[in-house]
Image: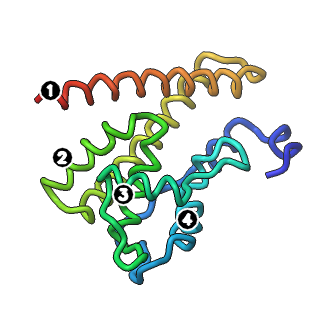
Amino acid sequence: MAKNEKKDMKFEDYFKIVKHKLPYWDELPEIDLYMDQVIALMEKYLSFHKTEDDTKIITNSMINNYVKLGIMPAPVKKKYSREHIAYLIIICSLKQALPISNIKDLIEIRVKRTSIEETLNFFSDLYDSVFNTVLAIGKKYSLKNSSDDELFSDTALFMAIGSNASKYIASQISKLNKIK
C-alpha cells in the first residue's frame, strides 16, 4: 500500500485490511524442504510480523540455534518437515513477546499433552481469536474516545499499551509456570 493511500484511508476501512492468519497443519507443505525453502515459506507465512522492510523473520542461524537449544527437532538429512515448520511458526510468532526459554517451556508443555499438529492448530486458532478480539477492542475504544483526527494515533497508542501489558502478564505467568 502506498503512503498516500494510507493518508486518504478512512478509519473504518483500515480495520478491514488489518487481518492476517497463521496457517493450520493441513495448510503446511506435505513434502520436506531445504533450509532456504523453509526461510522463504516462513517469510510468506509471517510477513505481517515485520516492522521494517529489511527485517528478517528467520535466518539460517536462528533455525540452527533453535535446534541446538532443543526447542525444535533437528532436520533429517538437511530437510525440514511439517513438524519443523509448525515449531518455527509458533517460535517466530512468540519471540517478540517472550524469551526463548519460556517459548521452549510452553511448547514442551503443550506438545506433551497433545502433538505438534494439535499444538499448531490450537495456536493458530488462539492467535486468530486474540488478534481479532484485540483489534475489535482497540477499534471500539478509539471510536468511543477519540475525535476523527485522533483515531489512528489513539488506536496505535492503545495497541502499544496493550502489547506491553500483554507481554508483562505473559512473562509473569510463564515464571509461575516454571515454579510448578
Q: Secondary structure at mark 4?
A: helix
- Residue 68 point in image, percent of width and height: 35, 54
Residue that carries the numbered disc 1 in the rendered image: 179
- What is the three-letter code of the residue carrying label 4? Ile
- What is the three-letter code of the residue carrying label 2? Ile
Q: State which quadrant residue 58 falls in.
A: bottom right
Q: Is residue 57 left or right of residue 87?
A: right
Give 127 or 62, whichever is nearer the viewer. Answer: 62
- Mark 4 or 2: in front is 4
The circle on residue 39 is: 4
Residue that carries the numbered disc 2 in the rendered image: 109
- What is the three-letter code of the residue carrying label 1? Ile
The circle on residue 110 is: none
Give 177 or 21, whichever is nearer the viewer. Answer: 177
- Mark 4 and mark 1: Cα distance apart in space: 35 Å
- Residue 112 point in image, percent of width and height: 14, 54
Q: State which quadrant residue 105 falls in.
A: top left
